[in-house]
Image: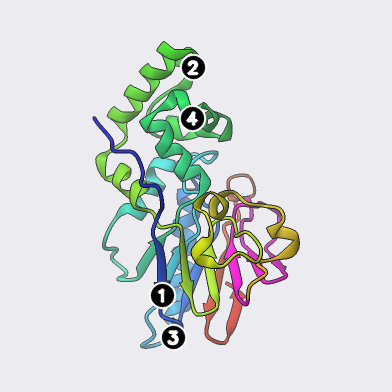
């Protein structure tokens, strides 16, 4: 299967500034059961807001480390869900690197150091069956291209990098402090830690992000981090965002 390389710049979404009800979900990392359980909790909460359409917004890192990356992507790649809730999935660094590994494993071997072996297993591939080196990794790449369904590839290719709603920016990792949003680089938005974690966005916005894992959500200067290390802790976090504020679900 031939796969086109990703575009040089991923899409940036602009949502209504007064989007009434957003549920942002932190890094999933192959934890399919946790996603389903949290979505059930979201449905129950959203039912209390009669007539207000909810939006579930995932902040990236759907693959690696946890046991069911394949199932997570299958779930998120579904265009219409039975509950009728709109879903938007943003790109994380693990998702971007997974796609690049599928296309050219020799140039992106670092993906295997990020928990990629768990993703391989979810697609029925055992890394131990392939030797390191050019021949082995090319064979692994070919096997992966045969196992990953085309609609999973399309999902990974089409993931937007960020979503802006009024003065709230949803993104996987963060931004370069003080740099106007149109000038932000995709790489920083899915990889940055410092100086963003210490300084905040340096813009009149609040950034809601994941990427930097911890035992609890972090409410920092101009930012809220909701990566609670689900693959190790079992805790997948959602942040409920309304025009009035943001609270943990």
> Disc 4 and disc 1: Cα gap in Å?
33 Å
What is the number of the mark on residue 127? none
Question: Which region is colored magenta?
Answer: 204-229
Q: CA distance from mark 2 to mark 3?
A: 50 Å
Residue 122 locus on image (x, y percent): 42, 35
Q: Which residue is mark 2?
A: 128
Quarter of the rendering containing residue 221: bottom right
Q: How far apart are the two marked residues, 3 and 4, measured between alpha carbons?
A: 45 Å
Q: Earlier in the sequence, mark 2 or mark 3?
A: 3
Residue sitting at 27 percent across and 38 percent down? 149
Q: Earlier in the sequence, mark 1 or mark 2?
A: 1
Q: CA distance from mark 1 to mark 2?
A: 44 Å
Q: Nearer the viewer, mark 3 or mark 4?
A: 4
Q: Quadrant of residue 6?
A: top left
Q: Could you say which disc has been placed on residue 108 in the image? A: 4
Q: Which residue is mark 1?
A: 15
Residue placed at 44% from the left, 78% from the top? 46
Q: Earlier in the sequence, mark 3 or mark 4?
A: 3
Query: How far across and how far down the image is residue 27, in percent?
Result: 54, 53
Please say whether residue 91 is one of the residues in the magenta stretch: no
Q: For the C terminus, which image quadrant?
A: bottom right
User: Looking at the image, is 187 positioned above or below residue 21?
Assistant: above
Q: What residue does disc 3 label?
A: 49
Task: Check residue 222 for magenta coloring.
Answer: yes
x 62%, y 51%: residue? 192
């Amino acid at each position: 299967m031939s796969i086109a390389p990703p575009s040089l710049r991923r899409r940036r979404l602009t949502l209504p500034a007064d989007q009434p009800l957003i549920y942002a979900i932190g890094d999933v990392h192959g934890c399919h059961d946790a996603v389903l359980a949290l979505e059930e909790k979201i449905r129950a909460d959203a039912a209390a807001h009669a007539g207000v359409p909810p939006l579930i917004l995932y902040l990236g890192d759907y693959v690696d480390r946890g046991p069911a990356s394949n199932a997570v992507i299958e779930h998120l790649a579904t265009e219409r869900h039975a509950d009728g809730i709109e879903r938007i999935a943003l790109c994380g660094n693990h998702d971007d690197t997974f796609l690049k590994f599928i296309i050219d494993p020799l140039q992106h071997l670092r993906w295997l150091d990020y928990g990629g072996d768990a993703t391989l297993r979810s697609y029925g591939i055992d890394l131990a069956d392939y030797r390191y080196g050019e021949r082995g990794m090319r064979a692994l790449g070919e096997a992966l291209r045969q196992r990953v369904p085309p609609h999973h590839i399309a999902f990974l290719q089409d993931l937007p990098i960020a979503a802006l709603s009024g003065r709230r920016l949803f993104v996987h990792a963060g931004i370069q402090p003080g740099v106007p949003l149109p000038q932000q680089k995709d790489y920083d938005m899915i990889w940055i830690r410092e100086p963003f974690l210490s300084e905040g966005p340096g813009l009149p916005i609040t950034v809601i992000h994941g990427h930097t894992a911890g035992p609890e959500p972090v409410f920092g200067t101009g930012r809220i981090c909701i990566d609670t290390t689900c693959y190790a802790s079992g805790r997948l976090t959602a942040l409920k965002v309304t025009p009035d504020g943001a609270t943990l679900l």
